[in-house]
């Protein structure tokens, strides 16, 4: 079925997009990068991290690029002082919510959150830290779940449900009490649905989900593998 | 999972859950209604883990999704509830009319601990049940009855302009009624 071609302006540059694409997908297809933490190519976009917010001319509202579909004649701005300010605040609030101490993290140096903070030039957090002390789940023979590193991007939830089909992970409670939870709040090692495939570990942007046996700075995630797996299977989110 | 959920629930309970699930006709979003009906049916007005497991099994919903829904909504209880529920409004209007003192005196009266006051600064939702399972004290953000502030709900009956005396009287009435 031939898809309708749309022409969109992104940062002043005229690009052509396909109907049904999101702003993020259209930008990526044309080599333009929009910062994001929760989006992973191949998984359903959810708009959890709010870092991909963009300005659309004709409205004062900011839209998440990952969930907003492109429309013909749309003019999108992806870089502006206002957007930078909003993105920085979102990022700072992620740091406030959990104990993201890089020096003791397996993902130090390979962490998307850390890289994003560096990119945004965040050296300090303006708000008071508000993180609880959460237990680390070491019950799985191969993997570790450290809630203290979690940013609730729900990549693990989606990769497990959509690609693996096990649907072990979900988000429990709400607001500041939200946590990633396996099955009926069971320890990971006791989760009967888990196939130990490790897709959630590779999808995780931080050190919240990691393989055992790696020391600080050693856990390198391969989330490209997930996107290529989706492409090869022909599943399109 | 299958066997375990079957063993832990008695036949009557299973039959009731099956009936509720059938009546919801596999509509999308039926899970909420199912959980609500099953909780209401339970003598202690809560959803034990075995029940959640059984519902997940019967509706072919992932366990994690059932748990997520049951914990997202304040309506669902995962702990057994007392025979009587006293619900204190902690909305702004009731707060300015002294609902914090009301809550504290009620908890003292019923012999409930005040210790978890420290972590949430009193802003968090409170849900406590007395050890004898007689009373459950909980808080809500607002009843929508701000003109009657401070508002207390005793067993789904709204008491406006509540004070420590009226609250004590309500508790005495309940206790006398149960003797």
Image (cartoon, helix red, strand yellow):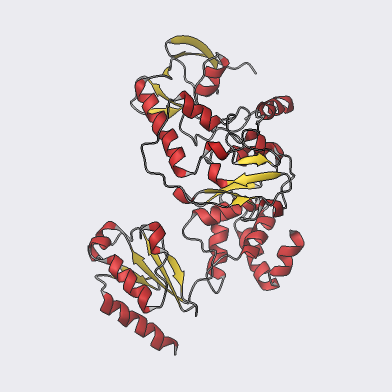
Q: Classify A12 as above or below A213.
A: above
A61 or A151, nearer to the observer: A151
Residue at left 45%, top 9%?
A13
Residue at left 31%, top 77%?
B167
Query: Measured from the top left, where is residue B52 in percent x and y?
Result: 62, 60
Query: Measured from the top left, where is residue B1 in percent x and y?
Result: 74, 58
Residue A13 seen anywhere in this rendered image of the structure: yes
**In which quarter of the view is residue B47 placed?**
bottom right
List the single residue furthest toward the top.
Answer: A14
A94 or A108, nearer to the observer: A108
Query: Measured from the top left, where is residue B156 in percent x and y?
Result: 39, 70
Q: Classify B67 as above or below A91.
A: below
Q: Classify A168 as above or below B128.
A: above
Query: Measured from the top left, where is residue A162 in percent x and y?
Result: 66, 38
A64 or B35, nearer to the observer: A64
Count of marks overlaid on the render: 0
**In which quarter of the view is residue B112 placed?**
bottom left
Q: Classify A175 as above or below B2.
A: above
Screen quadrant of the C terminus of chain B: bottom left
Residue A19 seen anywhere in this rendered image of the structure: no
């Amino acid at each position: 079925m031939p898809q309708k071609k749309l022409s969109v302006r992104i940062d002043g540059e005229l690009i052509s997009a396909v109907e049904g694409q999101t702003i993020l997908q259209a930008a990526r297809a044309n080599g333009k990068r929009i910062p994001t933490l929760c989006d992973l190519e191949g998984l359903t976009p959810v708009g959890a991290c709010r870092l991909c917010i963009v300005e659309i001319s004709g409205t004062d509202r900011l839209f998440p690029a990952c969930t907003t579909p492109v429309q013909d004649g749309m003019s999108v701005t992806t870089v502006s002082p206002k957007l930078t300010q909003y993105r920085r605040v979102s990022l700072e609030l992620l740091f406030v919510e959990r104990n993201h101490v890089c020096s003791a993290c397996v993902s130090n140096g390979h962490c998307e959150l850390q890289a994003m903070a560096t990119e945004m030039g965040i050296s300090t957090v303006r708000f008071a830290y508000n993180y609880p002390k959460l237990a680390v789940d070491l019950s799985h023979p191969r993997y570790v779940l450290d809630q203290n590193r979690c940013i609730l991007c729900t990549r693990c939830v989606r990769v497990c449900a959509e690609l693996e089909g096990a649907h072990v992970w979900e988000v429990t409670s709400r607001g500041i009490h939200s946590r990633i939870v396996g099955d009926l709040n069971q320890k990971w090692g006791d989760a009967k649905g888990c196939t130990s495939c490790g897709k959630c570990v590779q999808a995780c942007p931080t050190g919240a989900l990691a393989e055992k046996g790696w020391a600080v700075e050693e856990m390198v995630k391969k989330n490209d593998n997930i996107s290529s797996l989706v492409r090869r299977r022909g599943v399109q989110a | 999972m299958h066997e375990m959920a079957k063993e832990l629930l008695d036949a009557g309970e299973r039959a009731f859950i099956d009936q509720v699930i059938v009546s919801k006709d596999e509509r999308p979003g039926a899970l909420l209604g199912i959980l609500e009906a099953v909780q209401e049916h339970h003598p202690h007005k809560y959803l034990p883990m075995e029940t959640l497991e059984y519902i997940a099994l019967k509706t072919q919903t992932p366990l994690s999704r059932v748990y997520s829904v049951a914990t997202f909504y304040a309506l669902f209880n995962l702990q057994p509830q007392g025979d009587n529920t006293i619900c204190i409004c902690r909305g702004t209007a009731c707060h300015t009319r002294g609902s914090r003192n009301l809550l504290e005196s009620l908890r003292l009266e019923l012999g409930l601990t005040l210790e978890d006051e420290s972590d949430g600064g009193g802003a968090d939702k409170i849900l406590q049940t007395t050890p004898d399972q007689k009373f459950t004290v909980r808080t809500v953000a607002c009843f929508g009855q701000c003109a009657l502030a401070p508002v207390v709900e005793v067993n789904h009956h709204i008491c406006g302009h509540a004070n420590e005396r009226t609250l004590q009287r309500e508790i005495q009435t309940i206790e006398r009624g149960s003797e």
